[in-house]
Structures are given as C-alpha cells and as structure tokens.
Amino acid sequence: MLVAIKKELLVRKNELGSELIETIYFGGGTPSLLTAKELESVFSVIYKNYKVVNNAEITLEANPDDLTEQKIMELAKLPVNRLSIGIQSFFNDDLKFMNRAHTAEESKKCLTVALQYFDNITIDLIYGVPNMSNEKWLKNLKLAFEFGVPHISSYALTVEEKTALYNFIKKGKVLPLDENLALEHFNLLVKETEKNEFVQYEISNFGKQNYFSKHNTSYWLGEKYLGIGPSAHSFNGVERSWNVSNNAKYIKALAEDKLPNEVEKLTVNNVFNEYIMTGLRTIWGVSYQKIRKDFGEKYLQQLKKKAQPFIKRGLLELTNNTLITTKKGKFLVDGIASDLFKINS
C-alpha cells in the first residue's frame, strides 16, 4: 500500500501545477497504524516533489488506542503538527455501542499525553446516541473543555446500511435513532461551545480563534486539492476525480502504471450547488457578489427568489449581501441548501 501511495504521489505531481501546498492531511481510516519510519518515507516523497509552504498545517488522524506515549513522542518529531483524535465519547457504554476498539480510559490517557507534545489537537464527538441523556452529553462536552482541546468536530450518529447497528435496529434489539434527541444535543453543543469561546465556523466544526482547520476550510471555500490513496477524492477547479475504493485493485493498477480513478467534469450547476451547500454550512455564507461574478445574473435572481421563504421563516438571513444560516436554521441546513439548488439550466 505504501509503495502504491508513494507511486501515485509521483505520478500526479504535476496536476496542481505551481500551486503551493498549504495543508497535508493523513486521514480516511487509521494512518496512526503507520510507523514513524513509514510516515517519514511518505513525507520524503511529498517534500521532494511538491512545493510545501514552511508553516503548512499537517494533520494526522489517530485512534486513541494507537496513541501510546511512545507513539506520540515519535509523531512529534515528524512534520506532523496537528492531531485529529477519534474520541467519539468519554463513556465506555457508548464506545461499545458504536463498536469502537478503544476505551474511555485510553481516550483520557492519550489526550493527557498528546497535549504535552501538540498544541493543535481536534477531537471527534458523536451525539444523538440512543439512551444518551442530555446530562451525559453535557458531561462529554465538559470533559473536552477541561482537557483544553482547541477544536471539536461533532456529528450526529448516523446508521449506514449493512452495518451491525443497522441490523440491530431492524431486528428491534436497539432503539431507532431519535431526531428530536439529536436536535436537543446539537442545541446544547452550540450553546456550550459558545460559552467556552469556541466559534462554530462550520455546522459540525467548533474552533478557538486561530485553531480553525485550514485543511477542511479549503474544501468549503472551493480550493483545489489532491487526494492520494484508495477512495481519495480530488478537485482541480473544473473536474472532480475519485480513486477506486478497493485496496487490491488500487495497488494492482499503480503497479501497472495506471491511475485507478474516475474523472467527472463539473457542470456550472454542479459548481453552483456545491458552493450553496458548503457556503451555507460555514460562517462565511453565500456571497451574492460571488454568485453574480461566477454564475451570472440569472443564477443570482433565482437564488434570491428561492431564499426569500427561508429568510421570512428566520432560517436564513442576509448580511452584507451574503446569505447566512441562522442559529434556528443550522440543524436544517442540508435540506435548506438542497431547496436552493439549481436543477435545470
């Protein structure tokens, strides 16, 4: 796998042209399983073949059970300067329910050590878990605040088909997900993070000043990016591409000097709809000026017309000629965005 990843990095090194690399993100699973030496070999290929800025944000996703003190010390010696730790919950019954390999104790221990070596840490927390009371959710948040992590990404529990949780709910062994419970937890999340001086700069992302994720922000602002590895997605401004999700097929293709990806040229409507979706999820909103400049007067007038009912209902507001989601509208943002999409040309 590492050989294939490094080969793809080499093969695709000209795709971004003279673009400077400002963020690098090791994600999509368990990159914390890699040894320091293995990670070093990947960094070597990147730095030799790409123009990386001096203060690049370099994030590594990690599971708490992988982050021993020795591992954390090794990571601190690498170019990695930001950790994304999949805590999910500080309670063992929740972790067991979510089929996580780590324990609450491992979460607390790894955070205690990691914060001695890394200033920039983000953790994931899941809400809307059946049987999770509001009090328990507040305890999860309180623990995160007490540790002093400067960034939290928090998502409602979702159920994917063909998973154990999906089958348990179908058979009646587990209560179905409660949207009202998820909404209560979301409102508590917004309220408590605000009290603790976090900024909700994207629907699911809360950061202290100067700790917003530069990497994820670049996605939401429509910047170009290059995705390496199985299932990875890329965007060059006009086309989107994605790699095959099968590990064996990915490795085989690169061994045969083939790029295992599919490419889709985006229509004007695709680009418009993506800007609406991502813009409404962030504090930067959707700029009417940008709509007029990038898409034309016709798109702008249609958007204004479609947005009016949501403005009247207090779900959207217009500030400085920018459409922004209100507090009331945040939990409903995906549905609102889809109603504003341009369907026909």
Image: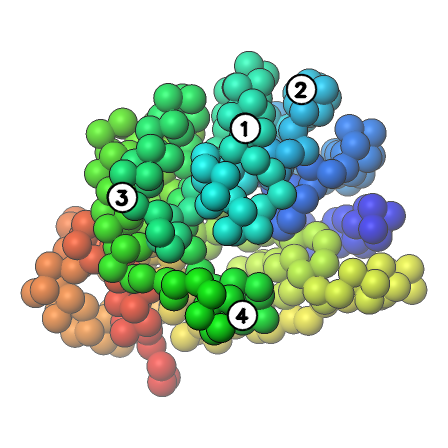
Q: Please tell me whether residue 12 is drawn above or below residue 262 in the rendered image.
A: above
- The amino acid at mark 3 is Asn
- Tell me whether the residue at label 3 lies in contact with that at label 2, contact meaning CB atoms closer than 8 angstroms: no
Q: Which mark is residue 69?
A: 2
Label 1 sits on a secondary structure element that is helix
- Residue 11 lies, with reference to residue 159, above or below; the image says above
User: Who's the residue at 57% across and 35% down the image?
Assistant: 103
Q: Are marks 1 and 3 in contact (CB under 8 Å)?
A: no
- Label 4 or label 2, whichever lies nearer to me, is 4
- Between the C-alphas of marks 2 and 1, the distance is 14 Å
Local packing at callout 4 (Cα closer than 10 Å; few below 14, some 14-19, many 20+) is: some
Q: Quadrant of residue 243?
A: bottom right
Residue 329 in percent (x, y) is at 20, 57
Kindly state the secondary structure of the residue where label 4 is placed.
helix
Q: Indicate which disc, 3 or 2, sits on the residue closer to the N terminus.
A: 2
Q: Secondary structure at mark 2?
A: helix
Measured as percent of width and height from the top left, residue 315 is found at: 16, 60
Give the residue type at disc 2. Answer: Glu
In the displayed structure image, the side of residue 259 where residue 59 appears, left or right: left
Q: Quadrant of the C terminus?
A: bottom left
Q: Is residue 320 left or right of residue 278?
A: left
Residue that numbered label 3 is attached to:
134
Identify the amino acid type marked 1: Glu
Label 1, on which residue? 105
Q: Which residue is mark 4?
A: 167
Mark 4 and mark 2 lie on one chain; the one further toward the N terminus is 2
Crowding at mark 3 (Cα within 10 Å: few <14, some 14-19, many 20+): some
Residue toward you, 136 or 195: 136
